[in-house]
Image (cartoon, rainbow, N blue to C red):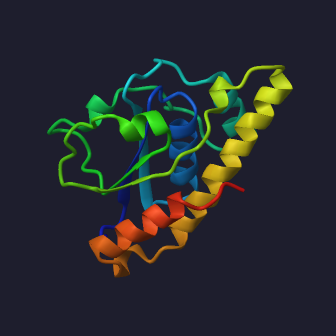
């Protein structure tokens, strides 16, 4: 991990909420040290409006965020990822495409706020809770001395971050 900008892909099934929030947050907090992307195995084709509302409310950029297939990142012209995170249990259990360069991967599971039913306020609270959990893990990622870790140590660290109890 010696590149100026580490490319990271967040994977989910629908690519409408969790992976989108992780992409936006890491791009913002990473301050050029990271370049984050997101995709889904079966993308919904649209970003969840509550995810957009939350990100906008936190002052995070939402322009350019879109629900897309992970196939966009498996081709020869795709950016070469260094880190890949699955953020939902479904995507973690699916057969992923071959990723050029064999990036380090880890599972960082979060509950699906888009699956929550009830009032808009209940749904917004679910999105906020998951956003805070994503934020906590991304902050742990940002604190890692990536340039000093060998591949196995990095893998171990990223998996340990994924096993942290949500706050």
Near-viewer residue (61 or 55): 55
| Residue 157 visible at all | yes
Identify the image quadrant of the C terminus.
bottom right
**Location of residue 91 with respect to 141 vertically, above or below:** above
Determine which quarter of the picture holds residue 152. Answer: bottom left
* Residue 4, position as x, y percentages in the image: 35, 67
* Residue 160, position as x, y percentages in the image: 49, 66
Q: 66 left or right of 146?
A: right
**Location of residue 107 with respect to 137 vertically, above or below:** above
* Residue 82, position as x, y percentages in the image: 30, 57
Identify the image quadrant of the N terminus.
bottom left
Residue at the spot x=29%, y=51% of the render?
Answer: 81
Q: 66 left or right of 93?
A: right
Q: 121 left or right of 10?
A: right
| Residue 52 visible at all | no
Residue at the spot x=73%, y=44% of the render?
Answer: 129
Of all residues, the one furthest to the left in this rendering is: 76
Q: Report the number of numbered marks.
A: 0
Residue at the spot x=18%, y=38% of the render?
Answer: 77
Determine which quarter of the picture holds residue 79. Answer: top left
Of all residues, the one furthest to the bottom in this rendering is: 148
Residue at the spot x=27%, y=30% of the render?
Answer: 71
Near-viewer residue (143 or 152): 152
Near-viewer residue (60 or 153): 153
**Location of residue 109 with respect to 52 vertically, above or below:** below
């Amino acid at each position: 991990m010696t590149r100026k900008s580490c490319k990271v892909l967040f994977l989910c099934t629908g690519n409408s909420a969790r992976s989108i929030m992780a992409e936006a947050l890491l791009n913002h907090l990473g301050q050029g040290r990271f370049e984050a992307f997101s995709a889904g195995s079966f993308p919904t084709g649209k970003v969840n409006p509550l995810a957009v509302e939350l990100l906008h409310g936190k002052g995070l950029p939402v322009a350019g965020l879109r629900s897309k297939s992970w196939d966009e990142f498996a081709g020869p012209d795709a950016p070469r990822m260094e880190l890949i995170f699955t953020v939902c249990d479904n995507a973690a259990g699916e057969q992923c495409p071959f990723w050029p360069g064999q990036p380090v991967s880890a599972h960082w599971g979060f509950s699906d706020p888009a699956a929550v039913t009830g009032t808009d306020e209940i749904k917004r609270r679910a999105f906020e809770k998951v956003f805070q959990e994503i934020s906590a893990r991304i902050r742990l990622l940002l604190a890692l001395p990536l340039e000093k870790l060998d591949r196995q140590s990095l893998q171990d660290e990223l998996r340990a971050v994924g096993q942290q109890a949500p706050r």
